[in-house]
Structure formats: structure tokens, C-alpha cells
Amino acid sequence: MYYVASGATAVRTGFAALLLCACPLLSGQDFRATITGQVTDAGGAAIAGAKVRAIQRSTNQVTEATSNQDGYYTLPYLQPSTYDIEVTAAGFDTLRRENLTLMVAEKRDLPLKLEVGNVHTEIQVTADVQEVQAADASGGLNFDALQASEYPINGRQVYMLMDLTPGVEFTQEQFGATGYSGTRAWDVSGAYVMNGGVQGTNSFSLNGAPVSLTGSWQIAPNADAVQEFKVMTNTYDASIARTGGGSVNTTLKSGTNQWHGSAYEYLRNALLDSNFTQNNMVGAPIGKHISNDFGGTLGGPIRKDKDFVFFSFDGFRERLPFPVVANVPPMDLRDGQHFSEYKMTIYDPLTVRPCAASDPAACASTNGGYIRNPFPGDVLPASRISPIGQRILSYYPAPNLPGIQQNYDFSSNTGQYRTDQPIGRWDHLMGNSDRLGVTFTFQTGYEWRDSTGIPGPAASGNTWSQRTDQNYIASYTHIISPTMLLDVRGSFGRYTPYMPHANLTADVTAQDLGMTNIPHAPTVSKSYPPRFLVDQFSNLFNNNANMYTWETDNQWNLAPTLTMTRATHTIKIGVDLIYAAIGTGSIGEATGQF
């Protein structure tokens, strides 16, 4: 039976407690696979001292174990791949089972039966018999490299395949300029519910290392770099922690004894796109849409049977239409002469006075005991019209639809995306007893989405939002004895999103609007225009309570694990140490709101 360790991550620190328990022939959760079983003779008697070897076909990497006095053996920490199993014991024919495919985090119960004979005689079994797997009760679904790279996925975001898993629901409903960004590799999401769990509480790991803190993945490896990933929806073992829902375990491809590579370019344009309703309203043609997803992979041996490397790069560029309908002031309202045509009463702020007891009706209709007079004819005198106000109004486009609201169709609005993602992996075999692996991932990208429908420098929304993620993962496995193995994994990850809600790249300041004495907070370097909220109309220069927000999530992880076979049990002892630091910042409306 086995152990496990887990911990809850706090804003500053988290620590995973050590727990030791016992259960039959199970191993702690890992992206690598485990084979367990019993070696017996034809009559079912246990064979002690049998040598069981798992030979990875792509690298000739050998993992070896010896059956104990009860005939039980364990082969842990096997990379998801295809293996040949070889069993030898004195006085018995050699048994060889070929083409045994192991999936991510799979625990395979593989009983092995030897025939009495000469040790030099070999019995070869080429079929991969599908037995009932009593060693693993975790529900879910595996997605292999072919599914990840060949299924038609919008944006080639591999985690969109999770929705095909029984018990998994993708709850996001609104997309587009004012909703969820999309399903590109750039996007992160916690909008999955697994088997009735709590949305936003799932965990994600990459080559065993955590790549999530708050229920959303922080990096989605490009489809051509993924060897396989498994969506575990329930009854996973106790080493999966910090989740109130399910867990997704992803492993990257590795180099083999043969050099292999690939190159790709996925192009999508507007030829088969239908037009938007917003464009049809004003007779505008469909906007420009072009997506390019390009990259490649390369993997092979540096030293055959010893050192293997794998590299991948994925680049994504997209420009697509994002038509938005905005609320802008009609042109005849902007001169201050036509409020009555819209049944608007305009009051003179210079006539504010306490209501008099002689006019109880007026007093009853006031808020706070003050009244004011309307402008005669609801017309603003030219001398009372502020040049600052006129300048601010000039940033509203002219309406191109009727009405006082929903009257401007920004049909030429476009969204822009760019992502670059290099990945590298090195595996080193130091003989049959020691293995070392190092993985590096990096991703950076940005997006532009004007969600208010106001063009130009007054635009706001996800304007040049940025996300950067980097992960460094190292693992070391040492075979102490045929029945005892040590595995140590360490990782560091940093995820930084920066989300401006105003167009901070625009060359417009408060002084350009005529607001020469407006102060600004020291958290910004220049006097950006304030946020303007105009009743009934779209915001100008910002549509959020913060000019921008940022966050940096740092996560350190150390997980040493000792695996032993004792009698009919596999005992796994370990600890999962996690230190997480989440820093967040926002500057509010640094230049004010009007």
C-alpha cells in the first residue's frame, strides 16, 4: 500500500503534510506509468527472484525489478511509451511480451506466468492483451499525441479536448470582444466542472510539476509537443492534492534513438466565414481575418542509448474582426441646442438653492432639499459650453445607426493576438540505475481587444494585455535495489499576466483635453486622461475601475518519493513541498474619474 503527501497553497506559503498509510499494490500519482504484478509458474505458485525488465522501444532504456519472496514486483516511473517486457528466472523459459503501450499516469496490473524449461528458451507474446485493471480506479480519459495534434481544435488549444471526457463540462458561454477571448493556446481558463466539483478548483501538471495555482492552467503546451495527457475526474489517489474537482496530467514528448522532426503551418482566413450581424446592420463587408499557427519539433539522440533531446516551437499570429455596437451621443446633442427633441430637461447648476417651504411640491421632488432651474428651452448658451467638454465629446465617433443608444456600429474593429512558445527537454541515462531529466517551457504573448466599440485613443478593454509563463522542471530517479527506488522532482514556475484596461500606448494626456491642473497618482508615469462615464453612453479612455492590473504567481515544488515492494504490497513514501507566492497589484483610476 502507499503513502501520500499533499498541501493547500496559501497566498504566501504552503506546506504539504506527510502521511503514511497502506493499500494493496498502488502507487502515488505521477505522469509516469507503473507496472505491478506477480510472477508465477503454470500452477500459480509464486516465483521469487525473477528478473523483470521493461525496455522502452524508442530509447532502449531499461527499467529492472526483482520479484520478492511472494513473487510480486513493481516497475515505477516509466515514461508513457511502448515497452517490451522480459522476464527471466532460473529453471524457467524466458518470457517476452512485446508492444505493451503505457499511458500517462497509468497503473498497469500485469501478472506474468512462466513455463518450466531451459533459461535459454524464449516464449514471445506479441499481442497486448487488455486485462481488467484492478490497480487503478481513477476515472477519466487519455488523449494521445495523435488526438492532440490531429483533432480539429479551434486555435489548437489542446485542453479544449477536455470537454470530451465523461463528467467534464465547459461552462463558458459568452465569447467575442466583450466575452471570453477564445480557445487559442494563449487563453487560460478555469471554466471547467469535473464530476460535480467546484468550478475553478481543478489542478494541472506538466511532466509531474504543478502548472496551476487557482484552478486555471498557466500554460497549454502546443499540440505537437504533447505526448499525451490524462483527464482524471474521480478516485485518483491521495498524491493529487490542491483540487476540489479533477486533475489534468500532461507529459511532453522526448527524444528517441532516431532523429525525428516536423514542421507545420496552419492558415485560416475569411473565405469561408459568414458576416457578423453587426456588419449586416450597416451594410459593411466582412472584416479581415487571417490566422497563422506555425512551428515545428525536433528530437533525437545526442548519444545513442544515453542522452536524448527534444525541442519544439509554436508561434501564433491572428487578426480577426471584432465588430462592437456602442452608445454614442447623437451629433445634434453635442451643440447643446437640441435636448428638447430627445425629451431631456437640462438644469442650470448655477441656480442650485435650498427649496422653500412655500413650494412643498418642489421640495418633495428633490433629493437633499435643493432645487435648481432648467435652462430656458433646454438650450445651453454658447458661453456656458466648456471647451474641455467639447474636446472630450470629439472622441466619440459619429453615429451610423438610428436612436440615442446602440447607435454606432464599429464594424472595422479588429482583435489581434500573438503568442510564442519554445519548449525543450533533455533526458540522460546514467546506466540502468540512474536517470536524469530536465524540462524547460516558456510562453509569452499579447492580445488587443477594444470591447467598448470606441475607436482611437479613447478605446478601452483588453488593450495590449500580456501573459508570460516559464517553467523549469528537473527529476532524478535512482534504483537503490531491485525492490526499492528513489525519485526526486523539483520545479519552479512563474506566471505573470498584465492587463491594461485603457489604451496606455495612445499619445493623449489630460493636458491635451485642456485639463491642465489635474493631478495623477505616483503609480503612473504620465498624466493619462481620466475615465469618463457619461450617462447613457459608452465610457471613454477606460472601462474598468483599474487603469491596469498585474499579477505574478511564483511556485516552487520539491517532491522526493521512495517506492518499495514488500510482500504483496507496494509502499510509497514521500513528501510534496510547495512554496507559492502570489503578488497582485492594481493602480485604480490613477488620474481620476468624471
Image (cartoon, rainbow, N blue to C red):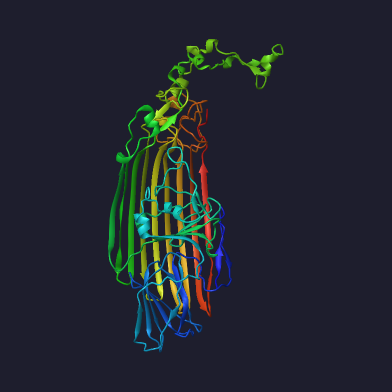
| Res 207 → quadrant | bottom left
Q: Where 320 sits versus 428, above or below?
A: above
From the image, which quarter does the N terminus lie in?
A: bottom right
In this view, the residue in front, 214 or 41, is: 41
Residue lying at 34% horizontally and 47% vertically, measured from the top left: 316
| Res 76 → quadrant | bottom left
Residue lying at 68% horizontally and 14% vertically, measured from the top left: 361
Q: Where 412 sits versus 18, above or below?
A: above
Q: Residue 22: x percent and y percent?
A: 57, 73
Residue lying at 35% horizontally and 35% vertically, measured from the top left: 275
What number of labels is visible?
0
Residue lying furthest right in this view?
Answer: 357
| Res 471 → quadrant | bottom left
Q: Residue 455: x percent and y percent?
A: 40, 30
Q: Residue 473: x percent and y percent?
A: 43, 61
Asked whether the viewer can see residue 529, the reply is: yes
Q: Where 31 sits versus 160, above or below?
A: below
Asked whether the viewer can see residue 507, the reply is: no
In this view, the residue in front, 374 or 591, is: 374
Residue lying furthest top in this view?
Answer: 376
Q: Where 228 sits versus 547, above or below?
A: below
In this view, the residue in front, 580 or 293, is: 293
In this view, the residue in front, 209 or 521, is: 209
Q: Residue 457: x percent and y percent?
A: 40, 31
